[in-house]
């Protein structure tokens, strides 16, 4: 794989996205494998069970398989399950149990305190719509409705995570009518309300936000800055 060093501060930047194993950027909005690898190595141990309930393109589960972690991948979209199943079709020396299933992150079919780490990347409200109207798909929801549902997600995360273990959520802000909507911090507050303690707030730099063409013209015309960061919230139960 590409050169890898564990991150040691709260600002993460990965100009090269990472393309080892079966990783690629084809699934719109999926996060860098450098993010998943850092979280998995720092906040779990070998043979632990890691949950990603917004499995998407399978980044978390690929890293679990490579790093000897058991994994549970859940998504409400059957297409995401099929994509991830294909991505996991590679050989490595680790003997781990990887489970994939359809499900709703607001109501997980998992036992209380059954996972050792949560590493997931929910949609950012309706910025990218991942399905054609599947009931319960959070990517279909407007800002306020999304926050109602993400509060249920936070409660379920707290329920299924073991005591003293960690939950990592990747989340970004949005913009409407020229004004920032602080989705990241709204989500953070709902996880704290669910009972979590705030371990870390990491700022992740985005590298596809160069102001050119349409966006450069509009950012100058309407006087707004392009959002070039996301948050990685690390919570402890």
Image (cartoon, rainbow, N blue to C red):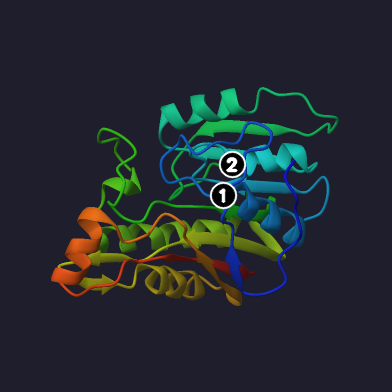
Is residue 84 at all visible to an observer of this figure?
Answer: yes
> Are discs 2 and 1 less than 8 Å apart at CB?
yes
**Residue found at x 55% / y 58%:** 157
Precedes in sequence: disc 2 or disc 1: 1
Q: Residues within 10 Å of mark 2 (few under 14, many from 20)?
A: many
Residue 205 placement (x, y as % from top left): 50, 65
Tell me if 236 is positioned left or right of 148 in this view.
right
Separation of residues labelled 2 and 1 (CA atoms): 8 Å
Q: Residues within 10 Å of mark 1 (few under 14, many from 20)?
A: some
Is residue 142 at all visible to an observer of this figure?
Answer: no
From the image, which quarter does the N terminus lie in? top right
Residue 231 placement (x, y as % from top left): 49, 67
**Residue found at x 69% / y 57%:** 38
Residue topped by disc 1: 32
Tell me if 129 is positioned left or right of 117 in this view.
left
Q: Is residue 1 above or below residue 148?
A: above
Residue topped by disc 2: 59
Mark toward the viewer: 2 or 1: 1
């Amino acid at each position: 794989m590409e050169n890898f060093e564990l991150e040691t501060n709260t600002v993460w930047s990965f100009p090269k996205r990472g393309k080892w194993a079966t990783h690629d950027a084809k699934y719109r909005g999926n996060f860098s494998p450098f993010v998943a690898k850092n979280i998995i190595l720092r906040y779990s141990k070998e043979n632990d069970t890691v949950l990603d309930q917004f499995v998407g393109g399978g980044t978390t589960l690929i890293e679990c398989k490579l790093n000897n972690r058991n994994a549970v991948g859940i998504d409400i979209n059957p297409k995401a399950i099929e994509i991830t199943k294909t991505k996991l079709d590679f050989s490595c020396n680790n003997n781990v149990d990887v489970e994939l299933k359809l499900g709703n992150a607001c109501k997980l079919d998992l036992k209380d305190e059954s996972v050792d780490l949560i590493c997931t990347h929910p949609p950012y409200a309706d910025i990218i719509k991942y399905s054609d109207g599947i009931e319960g798909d959070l990517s279909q929801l407007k800002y306020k409705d999304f926050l109602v549902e993400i509060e249920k997600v936070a409660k379920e995360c707290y329920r299924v995570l073991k005591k003293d273990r960690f939950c990592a959520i990747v989340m970004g802000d949005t913009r409407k009518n020229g004004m920032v909507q602080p989705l990241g911090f709204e989500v953070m507050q709902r996880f704290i309300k669910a009972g979590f303690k705030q371990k870390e707030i990491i700022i992740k730099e985005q590298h596809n936000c160069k102001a050119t063409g349409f966006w450069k013209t509009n950012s100058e015309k309407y006087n707004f800055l392009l959002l070039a960061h996301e948050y990685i919230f690390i919570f402890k139960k």
